[in-house]
Each structure stands twice: as structure tokens, then as C-alpha cells.
Image (cartoon, rainbow, N blue to C red):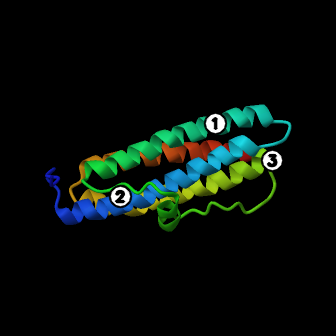
Amino acid sequence: MKTNIGLTDNARQFNAEVLSKLLADEFILYTKARNAHYNVTGVDFHSKHVYFEELYTELAVNVDAVAERIKTLGHYAPSSLKDYLKLTHLTEERSTDSTDSKSWISELLIDYEIIVSFIRQNIDAIEESNDKSTADFLIGLMEAHEKTAWMLRSHLG
């Protein structure tokens, strides 16, 4: 059945494509936060192990919310690792072999900032398509990621 929510087919298609890239980014970041949770080492192990669990738990909620927004627009939500790796702006590979918390935090911070920038670059076009719901959703997600980026930055001094 055709989605008839007051948006043009082109607007729904464009917005779903933006959201699909975001979904891939969120999933890759979720995976990296899990990796940090599993593999962090050092004297601050426990506190960072718990912190990284909080991050990946929040990201799991984001992954689901982005996928559901794509479906609300009447489009297929990509859900395979192959699709995510094609769509993402992030890399799943680490830039270092170090497993201390500062290394993990530095890498996660870069990815959070990439996602914030991607959302910021696309929000005007989504607003112009008259898709206030998707724009509002993305603004909220961007604000949450900005706050997490600030907190990660604060860990680094």
C-alpha cells in the first residue's frame, strides 16, 4: 500500500536515503562502542566498561528509531552488515591497537562528530521537503550526539 503522509515521493525517497546512511553510521558506532566495552583495559577499566555499555545501549535505541523512521516514510530499512558498510561514513577499523580508555574515547568522539556533521549538512534539505517529523527527529538525535561528544571530549581533558 502506498504511503500517503503529505510528502512527495521524491521527498520521502531523499529523506529515506539520508536516514539509511545515518542508520549505517549509527550501527557502526554501536558496534564500535560494544568493541570498546568488551576490550577496554587499564586502571579505569570498570568505570569505562560501564560507560561504554551506556553508550552502546543508547545507540541500540537510536538504530531502532532511525530504522522505524525510514519505515514510516514507506521505505525499506537496510539491515545487513554489507549494506551498512556500503552506506556508512565511518570505518569499522581502528586507527590504533591501543586498548586504553583514552584511545577508545578518541575514536568514538571522531565518529560522534562525523554523525553530528552529517545530520547538520542534511537537516535543511529535509526541512525544505516539508518533512517536519523527520527534521524534528534528526534535531533531537543531533542534540543527543552533541552532548555525548562533549562528554567524550571532557574525558580527554
Amino acid residing under circle 3: Asp
Is residue 70 left or right of 108 when viewed as pictured? left
Q: How crowded is mark 1: few (under 14 residues within 10 Å), some or many (20 or more)?
A: some
The residue singled out by tag 2 in the image is 123
Q: Can residue 24 be seen in this view?
A: yes
Classify mark 2: helix, strand or loop: helix
**Residue 140 visible in the displayed image:** no
Residues at marks 2 and 1, CA–CA distance in whole angstroms: 29 Å
* Structural distance between the alpha carbons of marks 2 and 3: 35 Å
Is tag 2's residue or tag 1's residue first in the polypeptide sequence?
1
Examine the rendered structure and indicate whether residue 47 appears above or below residue 77.
above
Question: Residue 143, percent across and down?
Answer: 46, 45
Q: Which of 55 and 139 is in front in this view?
A: 55
Q: Position of residue 140 (x, y in %)?
A: 40, 43
Assign a secondary structure to mark 1. Answer: helix
Question: Residue tagged by mark 1?
Answer: 53
The answer to which image quadrant residue 78 occupies is bottom left
For disc 3, the marked residue is 100
Mark 2 touching mark 3, by CB under 8 A?
no
